[in-house]
Image: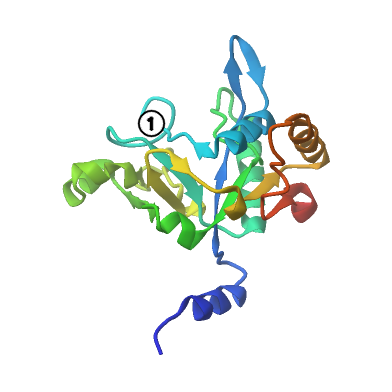
């Protein structure tokens, strides 16, 4: 018998450091000069059933092909990554907001089926000699040579999908950071009369209840 999905699931179930899910986290934005909160952005994504890919200009994606980014970590480890980002922004003036504790989670095979793959952590120039140019979207810079300027994102175990990511609500689990985010999500979804968004998703996870 081969290494089946059922065996794969059981192996992951026995490991606290592995996950069968991939998580995309989002952040707030601006529209017509007004700030839009991350939960509001999330609800817009749910309505459209599409996550827009990041580029070199608005993200950390190498090459000319946009990519949608995911973390391959268990929910508790994800909460630790979010907490570490918050601490870093508090300590470093002008640090960029990369994401908040608001996002969507999908089964790993579901993302794999549409071209999602683990990134390649390497020196950018070296990685470009290894990968074809149409796969440069997989490159994430990795450099531990300067004690005063480490570049290391391996804690995210990142996956990427080339371009945007279109999804079905039935494959989606929603992540919110706290009770306020949960209440905001319910309010926005109840106000949306075109369809029952929350009735179609797999579930909702309050990361604050997991972490604290």
- Residue 119 visible in rendering: yes
- Residue 91 visible in rendering: no
Disc 1: which residue: 55
Compared to 170, does 89 lie above or below? above
Compared to 174, does 190 lie above or below? above
| Label total for image | 1
For this rendering, which residue is in front, 12 or 46? 46
Image position, residue 126 (x, y; %): 21, 47
Residue 1 falls left or right of residue 176: left
Name the quadrant containing residue 18: bottom right
Image position, residue 185 (x, y; %): 75, 36
Look at 48% across and 58% down and name the residue there. 110
Residue furthest bottom in the image? 1
Image position, residue 96 (x, y; %): 54, 28
Q: How is the image coloured?
A: rainbow
For this rendering, which residue is in front, 51 or 49? 49
Look at 36% across and 47% down and name the residue there. 142
Residue 94 falls left or right of residue 55: right
Compared to 76, does 167 lie above or below? above
Which image quarter holds the N terminus?
bottom left
Q: Secondary structure at mark 1?
A: loop
Name the quadrant containing residue 100: top right
Image position, residue 176 (x, y; %): 71, 43
- Mark 1 closeness class: few <14, some 14–19, many ≥20 residues within 10 Å: some
Look at 37% across and 36% down and name the residue there. 61
For this rendering, which residue is in front, 52 or 144? 52
Residue furthest front in the image? 194
Look at 73% across and 51% down and name the residue there. 205
């Amino acid at each position: 018998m081969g290494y089946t999905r059922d065996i794969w699931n059981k192996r992951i179930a026995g490991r606290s450091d592995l996950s069968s899910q991939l998580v995309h986290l989002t952040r707030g934005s601006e529209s017509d000069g007004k700030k839009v909160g991350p939960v509001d952005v999330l609800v817009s994504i749910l309505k459209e059933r599409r996550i827009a890919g990041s580029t070199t200009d608005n993200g950390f994606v190498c090459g000319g092909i946009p990519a949608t980014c995911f973390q391959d970590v268990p929910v508790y480890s994800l909460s630790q990554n979010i907490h570490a980002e918050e601490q870093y922004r508090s300590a470093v003036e002008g640090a960029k907001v990369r994401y908040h504790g608001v996002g969507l989670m999908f089964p790993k095979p579901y993302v794999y089926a549409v071209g999602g793959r683990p990134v390649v952590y390497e020196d950018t120039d070296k990685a470009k000699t290894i990968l074809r140019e149409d796969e440069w979207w997989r490159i994430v810079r990795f450099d531990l040579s300067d004690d005063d300027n480490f570049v290391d994102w391996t804690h995210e175990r990142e996956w990427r999908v080339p371009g945007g990511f279109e999804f079905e609500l039935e494959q989606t689990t929603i992540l919110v950071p706290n009770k306020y985010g949960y209440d905001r999500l319910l309010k926005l979804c109840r106000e949306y009369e075109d369809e029952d968004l929350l009735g179609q998703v797999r579930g909702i996870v309050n990361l604050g209840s997991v972490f604290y």
